[in-house]
């Protein structure tokens, strides 16, 4: 316009040029200021700043606890920050001391995408109920590979409480056999056979290099044996290790009864463990063993050689030994499905009357019975006669005979005065004896008060480095085990005693 001064602003819009007058620009600036003021008053910019902040994905708890019988454990992944886009993250649950397939079902690495607006995602872990009453075990829930947000709580420990209550004990049938008879608690029991026993592993190892020996070792591996726990090498978490072993057995052979033994009270020189300090340690050890067993089904051979060595103890030491064994019986038989047998020695070690007195002093009245021949090679008929003699003095206490090495009887030394009644350290020419198990199931032996003929000392353990090639005491010796299997005697043999038969 004529007579007026104007200044124009050029604005490029999509290639076209628009001229905006100073007055128009002023109105534009004022409008933008008003809009900005209104948005600020509404808190728009603050919320936008918050949304733009970086977020995290985390497990909703730093630790989880699951009960034995609860079924599924729910675990939630929480997402914070800007939810306008997607979020990718991986999760899983892995083992610590808990066992997949035994304590819980493993959750493998799993990658998910959370949708826009989704703030949480929940997954489940199956807790396996085996009726265990024992020490807790642990798994680990974890996150990995989040994008675009970072991970907050990456790992969370999952504690699985083995807190099912102990079951009720049926004194007449503690192992729950289908048809208990004649006071024998194990007849009809299906025993666990360890697929990873020393003989089984040796048979696998030698199947090509020594096929004949491997075949003989399979004969031993195909029969039930006893897993042995020692106080000296288990550390502080005894209950957990016992529970773990028993869990494995039930994972492999559900519903089976496991044979266990201990060999801790005969250690070093005679009387070494018969002190107040060792007694306290042993009581703690055996109470943890009982805790680890819980509701599992166990035939327990308590402390091999603990009473056959009693003659070398003085009166004070014997009192401690008796107290140790009595305590062990009390805590083990408090479990609902445990039957305990005490060391009854062997016929060529002490008279029946003397051995009955030792058993009485050690609390045989609280146990199922006693076992014989655990570290000797004496004839089966001799041990049957000896066991029935002791039983008659103890009101009909039942007994089991170890027949894992006695099929050919004992090897007598040339001088019994100097070397004892039999050779105990890897005697040559011995063989497996009869076993009262058929297709994993224990059978009646037919002899009064005799609950079984079993290989509970696991044939093939070395008696010491007394002959060439022998490993140290207790170490499995495949060559010796193969000899025992080669000389297996399936029937009951020995001197002709009058033996009482089981009533029919």
Image (cartoon, grey):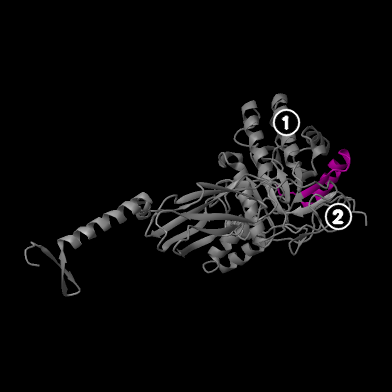
Magenta stretch in the rendered image: 376-400
Q: Is residue 463 toward the left or the right of residue 410 in the image?
A: left
Closest to the camera, between mark 2 and mark 1, is 2
- Queried whether the magenta region covers residue 146, the answer comes back as no
Rendered view: 355 above or below 227: above
Category of crowding for the residue at label 2, using alpha-carbon neighbours closer than 10 angstroms: few (below 14), some (14–19), many (at least 20): some
Q: Residue 454, located in which quarter of the rendered image?
A: bottom right
The numbered disc on residue 180 is 2
Residue in view at x 58 percent, y 55 percent: 74
Whole-percent x, y for residue 461 in the image: 61, 51
Q: Secondary structure at mark 1?
A: helix
- The C terminus, quarter of image: bottom right
Q: Is residue 426 toward the left or the right of residue 496 in the image?
A: left
Can residue 409 be seen here? The reply is: yes
Rendered view: 242 above or below 437: above
Whole-percent x, y for residue 498 in the image: 89, 50
Q: Is residue 326 toward the left or the right of residue 276 in the image?
A: right
The numbered disc on residue 463 is none
Depth check: 455 or 275 in front? 275
Q: Residue furthest top?
A: 316
- Queried whether the magenta region covers residue 391, the answer comes back as yes
Q: Residue furthest right?
A: 504
Q: Is residue 301 toward the left or the right of residue 86 in the image?
A: right
Instruction: Return the residue at label 1.
Output: 323
Earlier residue among tags 2 and 1: 2
Depth check: 170 or 455 in front? 170
- Counting the numbered discs, the total is 2
- The N terminus, quarter of image: bottom left
Depth check: 222 or 135 in front? 135
């Amino acid at each position: 316009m004529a007579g007026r001064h104007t200044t124009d602003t050029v604005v490029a819009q999509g290639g076209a040029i628009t001229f905006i007058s100073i007055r128009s620009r002023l109105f534009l600036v004022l409008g933008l200021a008003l809009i900005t003021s209104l948005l600020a008053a509404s808190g728009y910019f603050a919320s936008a700043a918050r949304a733009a902040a970086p977020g995290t994905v985390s497990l909703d708890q730093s630790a989880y606890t699951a009960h034995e019988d609860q079924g599924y454990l729910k675990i939630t992944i929480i997402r914070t920050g800007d939810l306008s886009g997607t979020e990718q993250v991986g999760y899983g649950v892995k083992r610590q001391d808990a066992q997949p397939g035994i304590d819980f079902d493993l959750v493998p690495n799993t990658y998910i995408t959370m949708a826009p607006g989704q703030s949480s995602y929940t997954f489940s872990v199956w807790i396996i109920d085996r009726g265990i009453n024992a020490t807790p075990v642990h798994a680990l829930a974890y996150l990995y590979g989040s994008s675009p947000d970072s991970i907050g709580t990456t790992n969370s420990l999952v504690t699985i409480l083995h807190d099912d209550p102990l079951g009720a004990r049926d004194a007449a049938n503690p192992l729950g056999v289908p048809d208990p008879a004649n006071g024998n608690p194990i007849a009809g029991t299906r025993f666990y056979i360890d697929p990873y026993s020393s003989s089984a592993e040796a048979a696998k190892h030698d199947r090509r290099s020594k096929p004949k020996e491997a075949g003989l070792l399979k004969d031993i591996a195909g029969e039930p044996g006893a897993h042995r726990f020692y106080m000296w090498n288990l550390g502080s978490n005894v209950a957990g290790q016992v529970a773990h072993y028993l869990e494995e057995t039930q994972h492999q052979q559900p519903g089976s009864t496991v044979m266990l033994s201990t060999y801790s009270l005969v250690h070093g020189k005679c009387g070494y463990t018969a002190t107040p300090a060792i007694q306290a340690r042993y009581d703690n050890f055996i109470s943890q063993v009982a805790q680890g067993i819980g509701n599992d089904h166990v035939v327990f051979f308590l402390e091999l050689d603990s009473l056959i060595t009693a003659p070398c103890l003085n009166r004070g030491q014997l009192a401690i030994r008796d107290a140790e064994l009595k305590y062990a019986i009390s805590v083990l038989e408090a479990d609902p499905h445990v039957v305990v047998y005490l060391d009854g020695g062997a016929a060529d070690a002490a008279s029946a009357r003397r051995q009955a007195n030792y058993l009485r002093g050690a609390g045989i009245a609280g146990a199922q019975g006693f076992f014989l021949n655990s570290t000797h090679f004496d004839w089966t008929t001799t041990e049957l006669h000896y066991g029935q003699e002791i039983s008659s003095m103890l009101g009909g206490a039942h007994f089991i005979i170890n027949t894992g090495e006695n099929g050919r009887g004992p090897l007598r030394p040339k001088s019994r005065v100097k070397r004892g009644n039999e050779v105990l350290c890897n005697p040559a020419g011995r063989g497996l004896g009869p076993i009262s198990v058929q297709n994993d199931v224990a059978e009646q032996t037919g002899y009064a008060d005799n609950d079984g003929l079993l290989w509970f000392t696991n044939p093939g353990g070395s008696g010491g480095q007394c002959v060439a090639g022998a490993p140290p005491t207790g170490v499995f010796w495949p060559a010796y085990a193969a000899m025992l299997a080669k000389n297996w005697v399936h029937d009951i043999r020995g001197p002709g005693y009058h033996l009482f038969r089981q009533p029919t």
